[in-house]
Image (cartoon, rainbow, N blue to C red):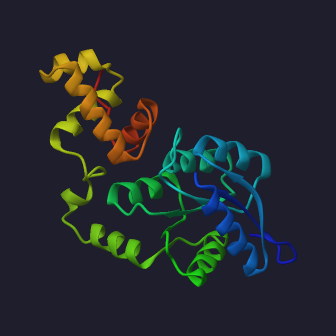
Amino acid sequence: MTPPDRPITVVLVDDHPVVRGGLRALIESFGGFTVVGEAADGEQAVREVQLSRPDVVVMDVMMPHVDGVEATRRIVRACPATAVLVLSMAEEDDVVFGAMQAGARGYLLKGAAQEEIERALRAVVAGEAIFGPGIASRVLGVFGRDPAERADPFPGLTARERDVLELVAQGRRNAVIADALGMAPKTVANHLSSIFGKLQVTDRSAAIVRARDGGLGRGRPG
């Protein structure tokens, strides 16, 4: 809990400087908040949080190098006392639930009202979980599905993409995946590009982490 006699400290993470500037002005206008750092991508975010140890991080998802989901995972591991509030345009189920699995305490869509952002910031710092109306309805929708469907951590992937991701998560390289699935290496590379986009990751290592967190890659590599 933040002592009542000091402001809530915030780090802003977004790859657009104008967005960060607007958020800084907005958050500091609330009273009781101070922005202690900014970052333009996930890798910078992890470093900044480790340096400044803020109460809360306002995290974008779609960023270059290291995306917001992977950055959230690293921050929660390194600085568990810091809350992460995602503020993003992305509202796909796999992105939202990926952020939740990574340890985000809240998820708002960009365009949320000022009052909603302030309430969410205070809530996650207090240890609550909070979601914007559009996200909350998606969460409820997923938990209202058939259990077998609900257990699917990557609903946006095709069956073939899931096969590729399974083998990637096992540590297999593209040539081996191509042989195992009876496709050309270039086709494997095309599937991987699609998978990276759908999982909002930028490299193979981040995709492996997401896949293993979702239960893939438990078979033995060949």
The residue under the point 50% across, 45% down is 67
Q: In the shown orientation, is residue 153 left or right of residue 80?
A: left
Locate the C terminus and report the quarter of the image it occupies: top left
Question: Residue 156 appears at what percent x and percent y?
Answer: 25, 52
Question: Residue 142 appears at what percent x and percent y?
Answer: 28, 67
Q: Which residue lies furthest to the right in this view?
A: 5
Q: 22 or 218, which is in the foreground?
A: 22
Question: Residue 50 appears at what percent x and percent y?
Answer: 73, 45
The residue under the point 17% across, 37% down is 160
Report which quarter residue 37 is drawn in.
Answer: bottom right
The residue under the point 55% across, 64% down is 105
Q: In this view, does 165 lie above or below 52?
A: above
Q: In this view, does 63 lie above or below 108?
A: above
Q: 115 or 143, which is in the foreground?
A: 115
> Is residue 222 visible in this depiction of the protein?
no
Locate the N terminus and report the quarter of the image it occupies: bottom right
The residue under the point 45% across, 31% down is 205
Q: In the shown orientation, is residue 57 left or right of residue 53?
A: left
Question: Residue 47 appears at what percent x and percent y?
Answer: 70, 42
